[in-house]
Image (spheres, grey):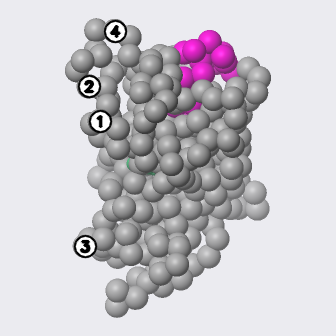
Amino acid sequence: MKIPFTKMHGCGNDYIYINCFEHTIDDPSTLSQQISDRHFGIGGDGIVLICPSDEADAKMRMFNIDGSEGKMCGNAIRCVAKYVYDNNIVAKEVLKIETLSGIKTIKLFMENGKMTTAKVDMGKAILEPALIPVQSKEENPLINFPLQVGDISYHITTVSMGNPHCVVFVEDPMLVDLPLIGPKFEHHSFFPESVNTEFIVVKDRNTLHMRVWERGSGETLACGTGACAAVVAAVLNGYCDKDSNITVKLLGGDLVIRYTDEGVFMTGPAVSVFDGEILV
Ligand SMILES: N[C@@H](CCC[C@H](N)C(=O)O)C(=O)O
């Protein structure tokens, strides 16, 4: 059997998108592990299923390279919006997409009838220590909290954007040995659900530089929920301001994030790269 797919990316965070309005995928976890491989598969940071929804215009399900399901993906949701709009599945310029962390509203921006950029209402950042184990709940574990990882004591700020993030401010993210350090954070006993880790340097009050190690996928060129978590953490630590546009510069491009009392808003690109067919 052949199943069509579209390779898309947002700031280089690339996934293999499958239209589940037309096709059913029985075992997306195994499929993600097989086809995400950059040597033996199509190559990507995982797969994304674009499905019908009873409550919204479409539903997104995303799977990391290791087959685990992510509750939310900031870069993928812009691509899902582009896919359903460009393929005439949803003819709306403001649309709603269901995810495992709730329904998100997305405003589309067009060039020549195609969507190029989207602004996503990512919802409120969750600052309760939902991701933090019991022993640290009485303290304020969220902001600038010391955590021993391997031989080093890092200061971390934890933020959930529907999925768990650990933000670490460093002098230069490019000097972080991510393949060595990333897995130590990801599998640290402090994070019962594992964690996505962002290494950030504050360039000025409106600019952050970031590298990310994603749980389930390793280093990616960008992480939308991670960029939101980084901005929330930067505001909580006094480096940036609420209600202002903050550019997060990632290896694969820029995202503009605004942290307000109403929620966190993310603006960024969505790009279609090529179509193909998977033989299953
Ligand atoms: N790249 C994503 C996040 C993908 C999910 C993450 N690895 C998880 O398991 O929580 C983004 O752009 O937000």
> Which of disc 1 and disc 2 is earlier in sequence?
2
Residue annotated with mark 1: 189
> Which of disc 4 and disc 3 is earlier in sequence?
3
Residue annotated with mark 2: 133
Q: In percent of the image, x 57 and y 78: which residue is there?
A: 275
From the viewer's side, name the closer residue of 191 and 91. 191
- Tag shown at residue 139: 4
Q: Nearer the viewer, mark 1 or mark 4?
A: 1
Give how far across and how far down residue 46 sits, in percent.
45, 63
Give how far across and how far down residue 143 sits, in percent.
47, 16
Q: Marks 3/1: CA distance?
A: 32 Å
Residue 185 higher or lower than 39, as above or below: above
**Contact, CB < 8 Å: mark 1 with mark 4?**
no
> Which of disc 4 and disc 1 is earlier in sequence?
4
- Tag shown at residue 26: 3
Q: Please give the range of residues in magenta.
A: 228-246
* Beta carbon of the mark 3 residue lies under 8 A of ligand 1: no
**Contact, CB < 8 Å: mark 3 with mark 2?**
no
Residue 22 among those drawn in magenta: no
Query: Three-letter amino acid code at disc 4?
Result: Glu
**Contact, CB < 8 Å: mark 4 with mark 2?**
no
Dot 3 falls on a residue whose secondary structure is loop
Dot 4 falls on a residue whose secondary structure is loop
> Which of disc 2 and disc 3 is earlier in sequence?
3
The N terminus - image quarter: bottom left
Direction from residue 239 to residue 197 in the image, left or right: left
Residue 142 showing in the rendered view: yes
